Amino acid sequence: MAVDREKVEQFIYHEARLTDENRYDEWLALWTDDALYWVPCGRDDIDPKREISLIYDDRTRLETRITRLKSGVAHAQEPKSRMRRIVSNIEIEEGANGEITAFANFMLAELRRGVQDIFAGRTIYRLRLVDGAFKLAYKKVLLVNNDEYIDNLTFLI
Amino acid sequence: MNGRAKIDYNTLVKTDRVNSRVYTDPQIFEDELERIFHRGWVFVGHRGEVPNPGDFRLKRIGLQPVIMVRDHAGKVNLLLNRCRHRGAVVCHETRGNARNFRCAYHGWTYKLDGSLAGVPYPEAYDDSFRREEYGLTRVPRVAEYRGFVFGSLSPAGITLEEHLGRAAREIDMFVGLSDAEEIEVSSGINKYDFKANWKLAVENSMDGYHPNVTHESFVSAVMERIKNNPSPEHGAVFDPNSFAAGSYGFAKDLGGGHVMLDYGFRIYDPLNRDPLPPVRAINASGEMHLSDLRRRTSPERAADMLREGGTHTLVFPNLILIGLHMRVVQPLSVDYTEVCLYPTTLKWLTPEVNQIRLRSHEAFFGSASLGGPDDSEIFERIQTAAAADLEPWNIISRGLGKERPDDEGYLYGDMTSEITQRAIWRQWKKMMTQDAGTAATRKRGSRTSTRS
């Protein structure tokens, strides 16, 4: 079965827009139960069994993250970040069991309390068809600055 | 001296209050560098960061760049990162393994112990040039406790043992009674910065009054998760009662500016999906440490300590031990600070338990975590508000007069007592008002004069 490239791209753009607009519940609904949301720390190819990540969320911790962001007292996101990101250079591979792996680059402008920061990196997505629609099973974000001092990465990256 | 007015620190820090100028005045920052960071003992790094000969990390003592490097004899050296020839840094990678340090400008090359190995075309120097006089400048005093390496830029002063005092026992708790070489500091570094004064991070780390408010979002989110899934296998309980008045936890003054919080229960949120693995040792040395720790505490407490950390202590001025990470607070200017967190693992624990240590750390600590960034947000709000100084006093009187001595005479208060804040400020004021004494050699200009 050929990969429907447009469908994959639409999913990726939709996911990006939900993160840009802090639409937490809709974003959480994209994920599978065996989710892994992963942002390595220090370099791209760490071994998570032996090294820390900036984010290494399974489904439960992802839910805790979202509950916190919605609480109104997550001070590092009060006020919330204003964001827009460009996602580009998308490459798609068909994996085992009908899973699709997609690779993309992104650049994000993030504004909070009068200071605008730029984040950039590469994202690896694993998508799975569930009842005819894509779900996100895996998202790994390789930040260009993952070995630098980062003041606040509490928005959805 | 540069002719500036002398600051009277007794008027800025009182028993129950602190003038916010201590967070904003560049002259005070200069004094802190000289009197606290260049004169006293400062934590630099742990042996476990440089396990093999040639391993190095770039560090700082105050603002001075330092190379921490293990040589072939196993010794950890602290060397100022500045070529003795024309003054370029000789090491520009933040970490790695080196055979030697070669300056990129004219090629002066230094061994791992800092001695000058050679220079290009040495024949052009006359007989008065002696290589042994031009090694990298060594930090005048270096001392270790259980692999924790401290340095002092002052050639004289109290010993590290005297400096640590009672805090040494909290280092013992932190390392789970391991030997120095069994602590692994190779699990990465959380690096974050904030636009505020360094002392705000120090105070906050030992503030048992703030968690239920600053971290309300974390507490409520974890509580909701527990409500939905109460299985004890599903993670630890964060008990908000422990951070309320009348809590069973306490805040303690260990003397010398060292302070601690003792909550004696599991606080963080381990890997959510999996049952907690039993705590086991994988070798004889580990069996010994484990049984020792179980005997000193209890089997349950020992397991919690090894999964999630055994103490919550400030080693004045810049080392904080919380959970299973070492935290180093690095002042860079009066209103800009960098912080590094070094999560640790233990060689004698099973990989499963070491992994739990990392996952529990990630929940609360780091730039994208569910805890720490809220603290940094508060530091910046305080720095902003310090400009409103018609009424400049910040109040640290909570629990004043209610301190009680423990069995050894160390004073403690309930978990929300600001006894820890008062103890930090008392030491700060002591160091800021101390006679220059041994600091004479640290005055600007005097070091260069000894070389000319």
Image (cartoon, rainbow, N blue to C red):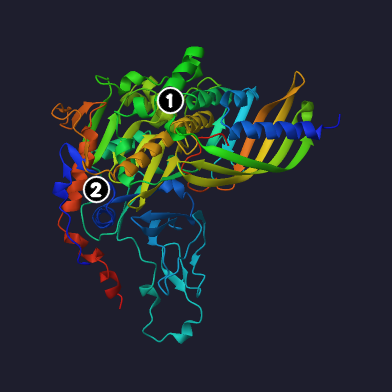
Image marks 1 and 2: residues in contact by CB distance under 8 Å:
no
- Distance from the alpha carbon under mark 1 to that under mark 2: 31 Å
Q: Is residue B83 left or right of residue A92?
A: left
Mark drawn on residue A86: none
Tags 1 and 2 both on a single chain: yes
Q: Is residue B241 left or right of residue B303?
A: left
Q: Secondary structure at mark 2?
A: helix
Q: Residue at x 49, y 57 (%)?
A: B54
What amino acid is found at the position of numbered circle 2 in the picture?
Answer: Arg
Q: Residue furthest right?
A: A1
Which of pointers 1 and 2 lies earlier in the amino acid sequence? Answer: 2
Q: Is residue B156 above or below residue B366?
A: below
Estimate the x, y position of residue A37 in percent, counting from the top left: 60, 31
Q: Nearer the viewer, residue B326 or B121?
A: B326
Q: Residue at x 39, y 49 (%)?
A: B45
The picture quadrant where one finds residue B83 is bottom left
Estimate the x, y position of residue B305 in percent, counting from the top left: 39, 28
Estimate the x, y position of residue A25 in percent, counting from the top left: 58, 23
Q: Nearer the viewer, residue B67 or B70?
A: B67
Which residue is disc 2 drawn over? B21
Q: Is residue A122 above or below residue A37?
A: below
Q: Residues within 10 Å of mark 2 (few under 14, many from 20)?
A: some
Return the chain for callout 1. Answer: B
Mark drawn on residue B217: 1
